[in-house]
Structure formats: C-alpha cells, structure tokens
Image (tube, helix red, strand yellow):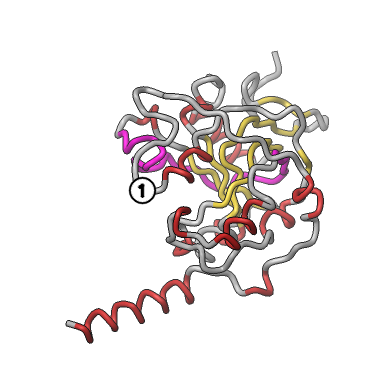
Amino acid sequence: MAAIRGALVVLATFTLGACGFLPITRLSSAGTDVLVQAPKPAPVDSDYHACGPSGSQPDYALNRRKNRVDTASQYIPISWQTLARLPFPRRVGYRFRNQWTSGETADVARLEGAAIEVEGYIASLKLETPEPPNCYSMDPRDRDYHLWLTEQPHQGKRESVVVEITPRVRVSHNGWSEDRLRALIETQVRVRLRGWLMLDQMHPESMPWTRFTLWEMHPIMRIEWKSERGDWIPLDSLSPGAERP
C-alpha cells in the first residue's frame, strides 16, 4: 500500500508539473505596474436563489471572488497580451486558498481584484455544469457562462483567456441572452469587456489546451461590441447583426 501511495503522489506531482503550469517563458510582468497600484476593493456579494455569498464547499474564499456583484467607478484598460501573460505562483493549482502559503497569497493579491477592461473576440461559449459558487444548482439560470476571449478573430481556445458571466450579474442584464452571446461568436465583432481580475487556480489541467492562463475576468460586468462605424454598442441594447433602431 505504501508503494501504491508513493506512486500516486509521483503521478499527481507529474500531472501538476506537466499539465498545470505554463512554461515560465510565457509569463511576463510587463504592464503589471498599473494593476499593482490599482484599487482592489473587497468583493460585494449577496444571497442568490438561496445560495449564500460563499457558495458551497470546498473553496469558499474563491467562491466569494466569483460571486461579487459590485461595479467599479473606473476600469483599467489592459491589452489581451498583458492579461494572458500575467504571472502567478506556479504551484497554486488544485490547492484551495486556505492551503496557500503567505507568499503565494501575497503574490496573487498584488494583482487580483483590479477592475480591468480588455478587448478581443469571443471564440466560444458554454453554459457550465453545476459548480461550487452556485451551490451546485442544476437550474440553467443559476449557472455560469464561460466565454473564451482571443486576441484576434477566428482563433481557438488554446489562444484564449476565459472570461465568465455569473448568474448573480446576469440577472441584471436581460440583453445578455444566449442568442446575443452567440451572435458575438458568429459575427466575430470586436468586443470590449469590463470586469474583475481573478485567478481561478482550479483549472490547471486545461492549460494550454483550452486556455492560455489561469487568470480570468470573473465576473464580467459590462459587454460592448464595436460597430462598423466604430461605435461601442452595449450588448444590453442591441445584438450584433441586428438593425439599429
């Protein structure tokens, strides 16, 4: 049994090292100064459909980040490249936040919680399975939408940053329907997103196959798309491809 346990530990270590972390050369501190200096207000959250601000086990601290509903007075514009290459502690993957070292916690806190604005293109969309922040609700209205944001049109998930719409925010945006979100994909119009910078350490297995980084915009607070005339149109008011009223 000891031999089996040892083999499992070696396998887990190899898996985390091989699949969980980007090569260090793909990470960069370029452009992070403005994020380090940015205000990082504590998340404002609330109960939603009998699911509290902390969601369900196991990582309540992460859930509170995901369940925030507050808007910022100002969002810091950063490039897709800056977001995709932000550094993070390489061994936080699959570890709950109460298991992080003080150094790992401090490294993430330098950047996490900044209100950011990023432009790009939506490559794909998925209504997620039941998850801890939403108390594992099966109801589609209680589940997140994962969007994959790329730097250029028609790129794939390997070249994407995950950005998420949460049910607690979506309830205030009737225009963020699945039809309108899919229209962003079909038309490949440029989008401008505003929301909160957050590290989701629970998905290292997806790098680099379906995401470029563990950093996300989560949750998204505003979605706009760029018209042919160069105007930024809120998705709340009009879908791309629709005639202007």
Q: Is residue 2 magenta?
A: no
| Rendered view: 205 above or below 41 | below
Q: Amino acid at mark 1?
A: Pro
Which stretch appears magenta?
Answer: 115-137
Quarter of the picture holding the C terminus: top right
Which residue occupies the foreground of this view, 151 or 164?
Answer: 164
| Residue in the image at 21% along x and 84% along y | 2
| Rendered view: 109 above or below 191 | below
Q: Residue furthest left?
A: 1
Kindly state the secondary structure of the residue where label 1 is placed.
Answer: loop
> How far across and how far down the image is residue 93, in percent?
48, 63
Q: Is residue 172 left or right of residue 223?
A: left
Work out whether residue 71 can be spotted. yes
| Residue in the image at 47% along x and 53% along y | 97
Q: Is residue 40 left or right of residue 48?
A: right
Residue 12 quadrant:
bottom left
| Rendered view: 83 above or below 90 | above
Q: Which residue is mark 1?
A: 58
Residue 147 quadrant:
top right
> How far across and how far down the image is residue 127, in percent?
42, 39
> How far across and how far down the image is residue 243, in percent?
67, 20
Query: How many numbered marks have been drawn onto this rendered protein structure?
Result: 1
> How far across and how far down the image is residue 79, in percent?
76, 50
| Residue in the image at 68% along x and 51% along y | 111
Q: Residue furthest bottom?
A: 3
